[in-house]
Every structure is written in C-alpha cells, then in structure tokens.
Amino acid sequence: MAVRNFLSCAKYLLVAAGITGVGGLAFLYSGIYPMGADVPHNALTYWGLETLRERSIAQAASDIKVPKDLDSAERLLKGGADYNDMCAGCHLQPDKTQTDFTLGLYPAPPNLSSNGSEHGHDDEGEYAQQRQFWIIKHGIKASGMPAWAPGHDDERIWNMVAFLKRLPGLSSEQYQILTARGENSEGHGH
C-alpha cells in the first residue's frame, strides 16, 4: 500500500513539474516580461536575481587571498587614478549623486563614494575586499559591470580595491588629489 501511495504521489509530482516546465517555457517565449532598463523588475524577480548574484559572488570570492599592503600610499594613488578613469562615471565620486550615464542604468550601480550601508554592502573586513576584487576582475553579467581582467593584472585590480577602502571617507578635494594621474604614470586610458 505504501509503495502504491508513493508511486501515485510521484506521478502527480512529475505531472506538476512538467506543467510548471511547460508554463515556464511558454512565459519565456511569450515576450511579455518587460526587459527595458526603464521598467524595474518586479519584487520577486529582483530578489531572485540579487540573491543569485550575492551567493555566487560569496562562493567565488571566498578563497581569494587579500594582500597585506592594501593600505600603502602607492596602491592608493595607483588605484585612485584607475578608479577615476574607469569607474567614477558609474560609481561616482565624492559630492556626486548621479551622472547622465547613471540615470539610465538599471539596476543602478552603487555609489561607491558613499559608505557601504548606503549601497547595501559592508565595505569593511576581508570579505568586502575579496568581494570587490572578484567583482572588478570578473564583472557581473547583465548589469553593465564589465570584467576588467582581460586588460588588467591582479596587482592593478588590488590597487583599485585599496582605493575603494578609502573612497567613502574622501572629500572632493582629497579625491582630486588622489586620482590625478602624473604624466609618466602607467595605465593612461582604459
């Protein structure tokens, strides 16, 4: 009797899974979900994508070894110049709340010049540095965040992480000083 009940239950579960799969494919191919960046995701979709992103990054970044010298002035200056060239257009600089570019991005990129709680992430501790390194190196699919690894070695990416540690506490004037690129600096442009 128990085997018969189990088989009956299994049959219903398989039918339910099949209907769900067909329904899901019908939804995907219907084209009714709005994909324009000017229409936000519904709450369930946003939660699912954010959870997937954060769990994936946490898993991938967990074994990254953080250099001991992230507080060095050399890293700060090199990372600041690269941040200004490559990141500030999306992730802003002190005393900026938006750019023409950020107005049209969805999801909106976090303002990295603000403290971590304002953009939903704790910017302190080793995991924050592992996370930042992984994101800069690998980018995030379908978010506008490019993978910088193809043109930047790990050392250069760690320099940007070093700068990100200090960025939220910088004034506009300090930012300008730390992001100025000298004439003989490496890495002009992108």
Image (spheres, helix red, strand yellow):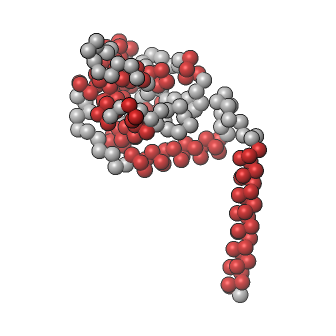
Above or below 153: residue 9: below
Indicate left or right for 27 with 164 as reference: right
Residue drawn at the location 68% of the way across and 84% of the way down = 3
**Residue 73 occupies which quadrant of the picture?**
top left
Q: Is residue 93 above or below residue 116?
A: above
Q: Is residue 80 visible?
A: no
x%, y% of residue 154? 32, 36
Give whichever of 82, 59 is nearer the camera.
Answer: 82
Quadrant containing the C terminus in the rendered view: top left
* Residue at 32 percent of width and 25 percent of height: 79
Q: Can you give x and y, in whole percent of width and height, for residue 109 in the image? A: 52, 29
What quarter of the picture does the N terminus occupy?
Answer: bottom right
Q: Residue 18 location, x and y as percent?
A: 72, 63
Q: Residue at x 67, y 39 (%)?
A: 42
Q: Determine the residue positioned at 71% across, 47% down.
A: 28
Q: Position of residue 44 (x, y in %)?
A: 65, 45
